[in-house]
Amino acid sequence: MTAPYKTISVSLDGNVLSATFHAPPINLIGPDVVRDLVGLLGEVSQPESARVVVFDSVDPDFFFPHVDLTKVSEYTAEAARAGGPGDASLGMLFRKLSEVPAVTIAKLRGRARGAGSEFLLACDMRFASRENAVVGQPEVGIGTPPGAGAIQHLTRLLGRGRALEAVLTSADFDAELAERYGWINRAVPDAELDAFVAGLAARIGNFPRHALIAAKAAINALTLPTSADVRADAALFQQLVRGPAAQQRLAELFELGLQTRGSTELDLGEALGGLKAVD
């Protein structure tokens, strides 16, 4: 890997690339993260690139808590670099993540909510710390459906009833419940997580590239949503997140400390349940 990244540290060990996110103070998905991710996906899409990519976060409390809600237009513009103005959305960028000719593995410690969870769902596999991992889709509690893949992926992975529970409650799910529902592949004891993922990645990385790519493409053809569905979800999110209900609830959340390192972000699912009711 040759490109310098502001928010991603990369290292290559054989056929496995490690990509660690570091976007202080709490790893929000903003313009810098999206710009770096566009660049990284371009690199791993090249012939003879790494066969396996392992994503993790330097922050033990926050993998990706959600997007930077003060910079929606800015990160959307960066996402357009991956596919053009017609595909200016995180949903289409994450679809490209699902389609790269490499096996992508997310190693989760801390919180991955909203687009952070949708990033995980776009990866090929997800392994989480049993003691220190939380996933959630808080968008409905804010005032909009998820817009970057959660509806599509969670319905396929969890089934209708559990997907509705996850999306409509906007609740936090710990790693054990997420594993039981199928949101993640496995919840692994924190002390064993690094070694487990490293061993799995090395094993896969030693297999023939053409077989890995062909098998992944065949499974993608059966399971990925259509581009039209992804675009529709993104358009609805971008419309409603700017609407009066979402803006009112976001204002209340910002007063409580949203996007700062405090109790509101640590326990966002609980905070959403305490907001004033709106139509």
Image: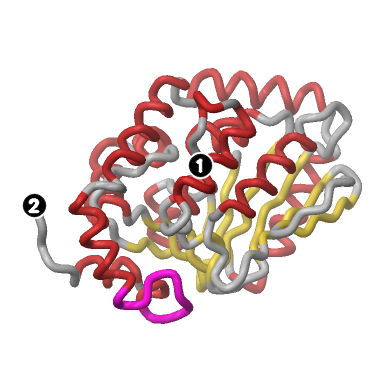
The type of colouring in the image is secondary structure
Residue at the location (36% across, 40% down)?
238
Q: Position of residue 52 (x, y in %)?
A: 76, 41
Asked if residue 68 shows in the view, the reply is: yes
95 vs 195: above or below: above
Residue at the location (66% across, 59% down)?
56
Asked if residue 158 shows in the view, the reply is: no
Circle 2 residues within 10 Å: few <14, some 14–19, many ≥20: few
Which residue type carries mark 2?
Asp
231 vs 114: above or below: above
Tell me the magenta residue range.
255-263
Residue holding disc 2: 279
Residue holding disc 1: 76
Secondary element under disc 2, as helix, strand or loop, is: loop
Which residue type carries mark 1?
Thr
Residue 194 left/right relative to 3: left
Tag 2 and tag 1, C-beta contact below 8 Å: no
